[in-house]
Image: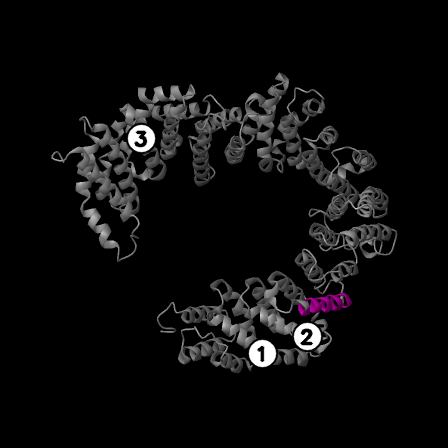
Amino acid sequence: MQNLNVHQTMATFWFAESLSDEVQKADIGNLHHRKYHDEVESNVDDVQTLMSYALTSDGKDSVKLRSEGLHCFLSWVFYAQQAWISKPETLQHLRILVRPALECLFVDVLETEATETFTDMLGNYALFFQPQHLEAVSSILRGPWGQERLARLRGGEELAHSFGAFLLAFGDAAVQDFVTKPYAVASQEIIGMLHGLITCTGHVGEDDEVALLSVDFWNTYVEFVTDSMFASGESPPWWIGPAKQNMMQAMEELWVKLQIPPPSLTTTWEESSRQEFSGFRADVADLMQSAHMVLGLDMLEKFAELVLRSLHDRDWLSVEATLFCLSALADSISEDDSGDSVLARVLGSSLFSDMSNADTSIPSKTRRTTVDMLGKYAEFFERHTEYLPAALNFLFVSLRLASLANSAARSISSLCSSCRQSLTSELDAFIQQYRQFLDWRTADAFTKHKVIGAIAAIVQALPSEESKVAPLQALLDCVERDVQISLECMAGGEDEMSEVAGLTVLQCLTSMGRASQLPDDVPIDLDSDQVQTGFWSQGPGLAVQQRVVRCIQNITEILADKGDVVEETCNILRTGFTETAPGPFVLPPSVTIEFVLQTSLTTPRLECVLTTACILLTTHSSESSTRIEAEATVVLQHISSLIRDLTEPHNDPEIAQSCVDVVARLIPRYVPVLLQLQPPTALEKLFTFTIACIAGPDPLPKRSATAFWAAYLAFTTPADLHASVDYTIQHFGLLLSTALVRQIGGDAARSELDFLAEPLKKLIFRQPLAKDWLEAALCGAEFPPSARVGLAEKRRFLQMVVGLRGKKETGNVVREFWVACRGTVSAYGS
């Protein structure tokens, strides 16, 4: 090396670095490439000598040589991670270079480069470092060099950010020691420095990148503590006390960083800065949820203390940050009453009265976070209804403010839904408040449907069906105001305004329908008189249903060409499908059928309408449900006309799939309806269409059609239908077999084979003629000419699938035959 000039030496380094980069591209698991890796390994002595020369050079070109040595070292370490991870003797050739590489940290012009090199290695291959190496890094970080750079970083020096990343990477690599050896001097000093990183000056999104990176380290710390606690069983590790202290300190330090910077700064932010700050907050929220598993009520106590102190000091940005933290913990603590006494101190404080105050010094973000938090603690308010009035009063006050209206409506919906039983005595006041709200400027589609749904949830909790009629009528009065607006706007040529008002009507009805559903945690009393009577379909409740239907009809008649209107109408109809007892939104099946019959191939969101028909048929498919044969007949006739107009599945694969799905829902309860489809040519066309779906290239219709045929072939035929079902199977058996065999013969995608195997299994098990049909299909002209199998392979396939008689192993045979037909194995069955 001494005989080479600097240019020749640099070229040698470039070659060595390129060699490691290129050889990494050769798969080490491939036997054909193994020789390259063996050759490289045999030259590791030379590589070590070369890099040692560079990293220890001290002549006039030492900076260039050391810099190139660092690049080369990093490249070879990453190659070693792939090739020599289980060869410590080979790795040792690189490990002895760690100390000379560390010396580059003390060379000013190489400091950043060396810092980034070790950051990469610690972050991506920490196992490369042996204990003595980690100890050496620790000594440097804790020594004058590290302390000076930490001070510069805390002082806001941007160039010191690379040091922060270096320290955090080391923290990740050595986290086990920090947790399990909390009283070691090195652990205490490094952890102290890591805490110092969070408290650096500046704001995330503006000039503090290190706090953002710190979250990753503390996630690693919390994860290690959590895993160790679970592994230790009932006896917590002896070091859990110091670990909790460090976690709590980090949470409080991050709480400071969560605080929104002053408007003088945020108003100058670009969108990227806002996104970075929002992302940081979301990451910290996730970290706090994880930390709560270890810290428990201590963490809740800390945030309660912080919010009460901030309220006392009128420090509104600190209040906002603390409420944000409490929101992050909601999923972890709201369902458990162990923290209720702590939450009561916060929610029973002056918080709501302060936020309801018109004091302009309170930032809107603080009010919004308060609103959002309330919706997340619905379970607490359900247990402690004494705090509901103040909370709801604040939310309705917030509903007036444009910046808070959506969040307030969302939280009102959450609280009223959860606490409905406790709010029935205030129902009249809610309805009166809603009427007033409709005149506010913030009453738009979103806020209207959220709040009316909240009130409908309270109506649902009333003790008798009779008591629900009047409040529902009052709410429908409000809905019909928008119906009238929509009709008038359409008549006046204001189509866009008509659509907005019409969609608002439908969204409000959807919210009312969902809120009227029986809550999941309420038992169903099957012996109740109200379940047995026709209160909603024939009695006093009928007027409510009729008004709901009339609202739907008025809007769909003038806006039938609007996709959002069609989809929202489907949402209303579906709200009653899941109910097991009559109710105001459990509409007669005829209402859904009438809506379905209004559609054609040009109807927007037709797939949504057909899916609604599927759900209706499924709802009435069980033996305990009401039979709807007349409605099923009408639906099938309409599907038949859609299929006739569509002609071929590929003309619109999504509609084709939806049509087949509807037909499949007729099995098993409404098979007689299917077989009685008139005229007979329509039934012929329908079955042929499903087979065309299997034979076609589109995956979704194909899957639906295979599911239809699998269900039809598996149908247990009653005596009176046996002849008809067998006739259709025999009539279409050859055509179906041909479509299945062609797909299995190579036309299908691999992901479709399991679906295709199902009707094949059912066909073989049910129909003795299946063997003849499959043989004809395998040997016929329709079999893919590109398939790379001969007559012997086809016969073997046929023998195996027929011999299995529909067993699950048929799927394996199908896959093997498909692979052979594609030509990706040398010989099928060998």
Looking at the image, residue 410 lies above or below residue 102? below
Q: Please give the residue where the numbered disc 1 appears in the rendered image.
A: 733
- Taking depth in this image into account, of 126 and 116 the one nearest to the observer is 116
- Taking depth in this image into account, of 54 and 459 the one nearest to the observer is 54
Q: Tell which tag, 1 or 2, sits nearer the viewer.
A: 2
Magenta-drawn stretch contains 642:
yes
Work out whether residue 444 can be spotted. Answer: yes
Res 691 → quadrant? bottom right
Q: Amino acid at mark 2?
A: Leu
Residue positioned 50% across, 74% down in the render: 741
The N terminus sits in image quarter:
top left
Q: Amino acid at mark 1?
A: Gly
**Could you tell me which secondary element the residue under label 3 belongs to?**
helix
Other residues around mark 2 within 10 Å, as few (<14) / some (14–19) / many (≥20): some
**Could you tell me which secondary element the residue under label 1 belongs to?**
helix
Q: Please give the residue where the numbered disc 2 appears in the rendered image.
A: 683
- Taking depth in this image into account, of 338 and 615 the one nearest to the observer is 615
Q: Please give the residue where the numbered disc 3 appears in the rendered image.
A: 113
From the top left corner, tell me how far across and down residue 158 is, in percent. 41, 24
Which residue sits furthest top? 313
Real-space Cα distance between discs 2 and 3? 76 Å
Residue positioned 60% across, 67% down in the render: 649
Residue positioned 69% across, 66% down in the render: 642
